[in-house]
């Protein structure tokens, strides 16, 4: 059990860093682009005369940018520290969002713009901010990561209605301008709050600080826990992303109005925020893989409620699935730091996170093809249920943490 004095010490010295990381995650590429893009679909269709499929394929190219650059980003974070990378990435990401507000070219160029936006914006994602938080917090690492990742959860709840109002009154170009201003807001806090990399005498900033413990990149990537996490959480990301994208059309097919379907979908965001706080506390007090297995199993039961009970249990199912979605990213960060240490955390978490995003990109497409093939969402729901249970099974097989995680690592 964590000592209360240690908890107070970590939070009293790290509250500003924690606030910065929470805001930064909420205003980063994986939040601003992913959770707001849906409200741009129809205006972009009307302005450019693109099809809905052409517009929504933008997210695939955005995901591709993040997936390809993630390992390099992790290497840069390990070498230079989160602060330097974020100071460059935040304004660059904002500038590309502003460029989207002035866009007037072909569909291929639009894809390229968003590929570059998420490629540059990868330095504003949880890959970076969880490294900063994990480097400072040890006893309270689980709840600290949970708080950090309430940023994207809050964005999931607030961004769609907020951006809908902006676009309705001022148009889609104003919407991208607002996103650009939101993206740059964490910059000053990053400058002030993220810790500088300390360079011991006789070393250069390119030298890995010896105080950081952990496995080598090669040993970590050759270990069973690494690939268990990659495959298990990849399966969970397929199920969760398919649910997020297809829940509203599923409920509409079942007879709900657009307003009622949207209100049910909003419950997912509430589950994300609550899940990250509850699970963050739980993994500080209980063995994290068992917590993960329990949460993923409960989410699978939520999908079964949709299969068996239909719309009558839709809100309960959405809340349970939101809990699983809230567990994914912070559990990934926590398990990476505990199994492999902080020495090469940036690189290792980036690789795992990239694989995780492959699942996010694949889930909606798989569910869509199943719907097209069978004419209903039944098979897709069984696929989602199975993917969540595969994640639970993978989590329960993870071994005890390695001893390198103690004593507490020193932040870079």
Image (spheres, grey):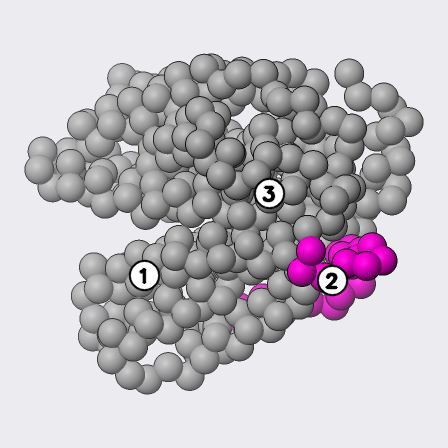
Q: Residue under circle 2?
A: 204
Check contact, mark 1 vs mark 2: CB within 8 A. no
In 3D space, how far apart are the residues under numbered discs 3 and 1 (Cα atoms)?
A: 26 Å
Which is more N-terminal, label 1 or label 3?
1
Task: Give 306 or 352, whichever is nearer the viewer.
Answer: 352
Which is more N-terminal, label 2 or label 1?
1
- Give the quarter of the image for residue 250: top left
Q: Which mark is residue 345?
A: 3
Provide residue 245's location: percent of width, then percent of height: 33, 45
Provide residue 205's location: percent of width, then percent of height: 72, 61
- In the image, is 206 to the left or to the right of 249? right
- In the image, is 392 to the left or to the right of 216? left
- At label 2, counting other C-alpha atoms closer than 10 Å, the crowd grade (few under 14, some 14-19, many 20 or more) is few
- In the image, is 130 to the left or to the right of 223? right
Foreground disc of the pair 3, 1: 3
- Residue 194 is a magenta residue: yes
The stretch of residues the image draws in magenta is 179-207
Q: Residue under circle 1?
A: 61
Check contact, mark 3 vs mark 2: CB within 8 A. no
Determine if residue 198 is in view. Answer: yes
Provide residue 355's location: percent of width, then percent of height: 39, 43
In 3D space, how far apart are the residues under numbered discs 3 and 2 (Cα atoms)?
A: 20 Å
- At label 3, counting other C-alpha atoms closer than 10 Å, the crowd grade (few under 14, some 14-19, many 20 or more) is many
Provide residue 213's location: percent of width, then percent of height: 69, 36
Q: Residue at x 61, y 21 (%)?
A: 401
In 3D space, how far apart are the residues under numbered discs 1 and 2 (Cα atoms)?
A: 37 Å
């Amino acid at each position: 059990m964590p000592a209360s004095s240690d908890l107070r010490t970590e939070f009293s010295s790290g509250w500003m860093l924690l606030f910065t990381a929470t805001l930064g995650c909420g205003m980063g590429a994986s939040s601003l682009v992913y959770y707001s893009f849906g409200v741009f679909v129809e205006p972009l269709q009307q302005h450019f005369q693109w099809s809905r499929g052409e517009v929504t394929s933008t997210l695939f190219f955005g995901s591709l940018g993040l997936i390809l650059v993630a390992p390099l980003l992790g290497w840069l974070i390990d070498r230079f520290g989160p602060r330097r990378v974020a100071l460059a990435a935040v304004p660059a990401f904002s500038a590309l969002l502003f460029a989207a507000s002035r866009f007037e070219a072909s569909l291929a160029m639009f894809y390229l713009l968003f590929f570059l936006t998420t490629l540059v914006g990868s330095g504003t994602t949880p890959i970076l901010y969880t490294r900063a938080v994990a480097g400072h917090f040890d006893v309270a690492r689980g709840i600290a990561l949970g708080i950090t990742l309430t940023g994207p959860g809050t964005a999931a709840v607030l961004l769609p209605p907020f951006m809908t109002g902006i676009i309705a009154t001022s148009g889609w170009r104003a919407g991208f301008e607002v996103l650009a201003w939101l993206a740059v807001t964490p910059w000053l806090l990053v400058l002030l709050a993220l810790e500088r990399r300390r360079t011991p005498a006789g070393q250069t900033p390119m030298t890995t600080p010896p105080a950081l413990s952990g496995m080598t990149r090669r040993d970590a990537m050759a270990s069973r826990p690494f690939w268990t996490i990659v495959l298990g959480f990849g399966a969970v990301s397929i199920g969760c992303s398919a649910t997020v994208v297809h829940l509203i059309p599923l409920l509409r097919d079942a007879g709900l109005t657009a307003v009622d379907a949207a209100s049910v979908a909003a419950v997912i965001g509430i589950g994300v925020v609550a899940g990250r706080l509850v699970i963050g506390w739980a993994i500080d007090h209980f063995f994290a893989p068992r917590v993960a297995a329990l949460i993923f199993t409960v989410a699978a039961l939520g999908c079964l409620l949709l299969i068996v009970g239909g719309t009558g249990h839709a809100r309960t199912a959405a809340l349970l699935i939101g809990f699983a979605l809230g567990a994914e990213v912070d559990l990934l960060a926590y398990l990476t730091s505990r199994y492999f240490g902080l020495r090469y955390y940036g690189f290792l978490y980036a690789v795992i996170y990239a694989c995780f995003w492959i699942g996010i990109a694949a889930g909606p497409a798989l569910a869509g093809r199943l719907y097209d093939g069978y004419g209903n969402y039944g098979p897709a729901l069984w696929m989602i249920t199975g993917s969540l249970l595969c994640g639970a099974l993978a989590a329960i097989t993870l071994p005890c943490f390695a001893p390198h995680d103690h004593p507490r690592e020193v932040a870079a």
